[in-house]
Image: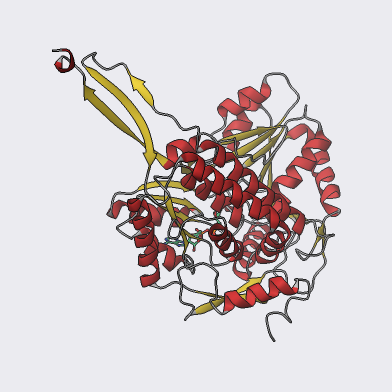
Amino acid sequence: MTITDALPLISPTLASWLNDVSRGKFSTPDIATSGEIAYPVLDPGTGRTLANVPISNSDHVARAVRKARAAMDDGRWSEQDPDYREAALLRLAALVERDFDTLVTLEAVDTGKPRAEAALDIHEVTLVLRYYAGWCTKVTGSTIAAPRQFAAQTIREAVGVCVAITPWNYPLPILMYKLAPALAFGNSIVAKPSELAPLSSIYFLELCSEAGIPDGVVSLVLGPGEVGADLVSQPGIDKISFTGSTTTGKAIMRAAAEHPTKVTLELGGKSPHIVFASADLDAAVAGVAAGIWTNAGQVCVAGSRLLVEESVKEIFIQKLVAFTDEYHVGHALDDRSMMGPMISARQLEKAQATITEAQKSGARITTAGTVHSEVGTFLAPTIIDGLDGSHAAHQEEIFGPVLTVDSFGSEDEAATRANSTPFGLAAGVWTDAAGQSTRMARKLNAGTVWVNTYGVFHPTLPFGGTKASGFGRELGESAVEAYTQTKTIVEDIAGRGGE
Ligand code: NAD
């Protein structure tokens, strides 16, 4: 079967592009691979091959880093005027908008998420590009009140060659959180997308070339974790920005220690979603459902632990199950789908094993919604209730459409339970009691707390974790710190001129 036959729902143009990817034919030399060894990338909603994606070998990885270094050294990007870089990032945003439908379809079939969700992702890509385009001309240094003998100032310069390693759940938005600020401040960047969903990143690289970003400034290497391990151990890199699992984050930190390299880590989570009796329960139900069923729960900030005040627990669960029963779980390109499949058989098996184990431990398991597919790696929305808070289902990231339920009797108990996992990425609080939201937000150990809403991302809002969820912040003004370094310039101005 040809790739085109396998994709009746994809346009001939996109099918032809996928065939080019399988032949290792790209419109930019900055996709560093020769196409000799390839592996199949699947549509998780059907299990069919979308493309055979070529793998980068060690030479490709080293060459991409050398090209990025050469681009830094000769200033083809880093020493351009800020408004030159601004214009290029704006052109890039316009190209993403021009190819919006193609990118949405590609992201949807590659990750399995419904097309409507993928559309939000690609829209976010344009927002992030435009936001950091604006930053190109806004970054400033300072003058310092050093002793009067000296004129002292700081300027902000590019960090240098940045490496971006990204996961499969939000491939293009997460790449953009790194690439847009890196480029805005004059860095070069070598990126490695997840092997499970690399297609939108490949497409985007071709757009970078079309937007006039000079050769070597942005490169892509392709393949599994070993390619990422090779990339982060290269001597010529100045910064690693990683988003992915806590286990891989630890390995990257160890590798970074070899050639002391700056690292930011955006890792896993087990975010509590806390509902007080005073809350608008219907709004909270919709928020909790979106917080865990979006992207089939494969979201770093998934509100995967529901903590609900004892007095409203039963009614809240009933409402949540009724709300979720409306979910049409199906293929990404079926416009009725509200939730898609899990990314792979491996992830599905992992989630199923946790559910089985929870059941053995005496949990009450409720499934809701309807799966409309005979094939693909689908799991119906699943609610696990009745386990002790220390059970693995409450403590470990499942990364699937699986919600655990626990209850509390007081604010302090809610905060203690919420903070009881190794993670600290995000938290949600639903309450209408005056002052309670702020008191709770202060007590919660999380990088982001959403109150009476959940999962709000915007280029202006810094994002990142605490504890095992990582460190460093992306988005907003935080990226200035992440992708520039301060240089202090001191001049002795005493005496000599006036004599
Ligand atoms: P993963 O850690 O398996 O892989 C992430 C990336 O790292 C992939 O590109 C992979 O190929 C690469 N990689 C694997 N081993 C490597 C190594 N030794 N050295 C260098 N690179 C290596 O994660 P995943 O399964 O793709 O993504 C899911 C995880 O990502 C979840 O834990 C989720 O919570 C987390 N995540 C976090 C955020 C956040 O912002 N905090 C966002 C999205 C996903």
Q: Where residue 153 appears, x then y in whole percent? A: 32, 25
Left/right of residue 325 with respect to residue 90 in the rendered view: right
* Quadrant of the drawing holding the C terminus: top left
Q: Where residue 28 appears, x then y in whole percent? A: 51, 67
Image quadrant in which you'd find residue 167:
bottom right
Q: Where residue 110 appears, x then y in whole percent? A: 65, 66
Q: Residue at x 65, y 57 (%)?
A: 400
Query: How many labels were placed on the picture?
Result: 0
Q: Residue at x 49, y 78 (%)?
A: 35
Left/right of residue 312 with respect to residue 357 in the rendered view: right
Image quadrant in which you'd find residue 305:
top right
Q: Which residue is the extreme one toward the bottom? A: 1
* Quadrant of the drawing holding the N terminus: bottom right
243 up-or-down from 370: above or below: above
What colouring does the structure picture have? secondary structure
Residue 187 appears in the figure:
yes
| 373 or 362: nearer the viewer | 373
412 up-or-down from 494: above or below: below
Q: Which residue is the extreme one toward the front? A: 499
Left/right of residue 383 with respect to residue 255 in the rendered view: right
Q: Residue at x 48, y 47 (%)?
A: 183
Residue 300 appears in the figure:
no
371 up-or-down from 375: above or below: above
Left/right of residue 274 with respect to residue 258 in the rendered view: right
